[in-house]
Image (spheres, rainbow, N blue to C red):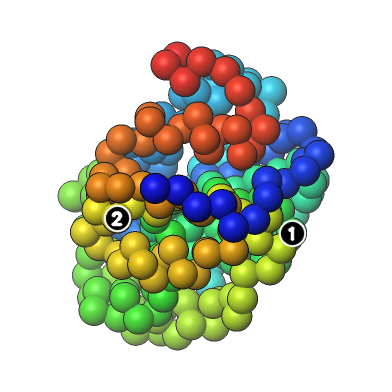
Amino acid sequence: MSASAAPAVQAAAPLTHLLYLHGFRSSPRSFKAQRMQAWMQQHQPDVHWWCPQLPPSPREAVELLERGTADWPREGMAVVGSSLGGFYATVMAERLGCRAALINPAVEPARDLAKYIGEQTAFHDPQQHFFFRPEFVDELRALHPPAVTRPQRYLALVATGDEVLDWREMAARYAQCQLHVIQGSDHALSDFDAHLPQLLAFLGLSGNTRG
């Protein structure tokens, strides 16, 4: 099932810069980040790609992103974010006015991550530990955009099989955006390749998604 409550962005500027944001406990080594980076390198090598390792502090994460994109053209850039990265992508899109593609985006991370206060391990490197501090919850609360403005600049891919986040809450948050509700799948969107063409089309990109 898919729903498109808003028309696609019309006459968007060609994409020149792309930012990818991973989720909580994840990294640039995530499957989706690696898959998308490989596609970009093969089919769109002229587009500047940046997928930074985000610090545990939400405030520091957004500051890093703002510094790193300070000289990027707003009309020519876009951000893709998964889970907590989808929340950060929304923050960046609201602050910068750029396009954003969201994959199972966290809607209320301050609420959901409060139970993870304490020492955590990284998904892609169990030897790497970090501490999720109580004040990080407050930072998430402070960053939360009060509303999604200019919904036509957003694409949200939401899986009903998400075992971590409530797909109904995600769908409600981005109901006025280009919303694609995926029957089944999971939080990681393991069938990412099946949805990559739609994401690329939203970004104004095209090419062989099998490459």
| Residue in front for this viewpoint, 130 or 45 | 45
**Between marks 1 and 2 in the image, the one whose residue lies nearer the viewer:** 2
Residue depicted at 46% across the width and 32% down the height: 196
Q: So how many labels did they put on this image?
A: 2
Q: Which mark is residue 160?
A: 2
Q: Is residue 126 above or below residue 205?
A: below
Residue depicted at 47% across the width and 20% down the height: 209
Q: Position of residue 74 (x, y in %)?
A: 78, 50
**Snapshot quadrant of residue 170:** bottom left
Q: Secondary structure at mark 1?
A: loop
Q: Mark 1: give few (<14), some (14-19) or many (20+) Cα within 10 Å.
A: some
Mark 2 or mark 1, which is nearer the start of the sequence?
Answer: 1
Tell me the CA gap for discs 1 and 2.
Answer: 28 Å
Locate residue 58 relative to residue 67 in the image: left or right. left
Q: Name the residue at the left extreme.
A: 126
Which residue in the protein does label 1 denote?
A: 97
Q: Position of residue 62 (x, y in %)?
A: 57, 64
Locate residue 82 relative to residue 204 in the image: left or right. left
Q: Position of residue 8 (x, y in %)?
A: 68, 46
Locate residue 82 relative to residue 88 in the image: left or right. left
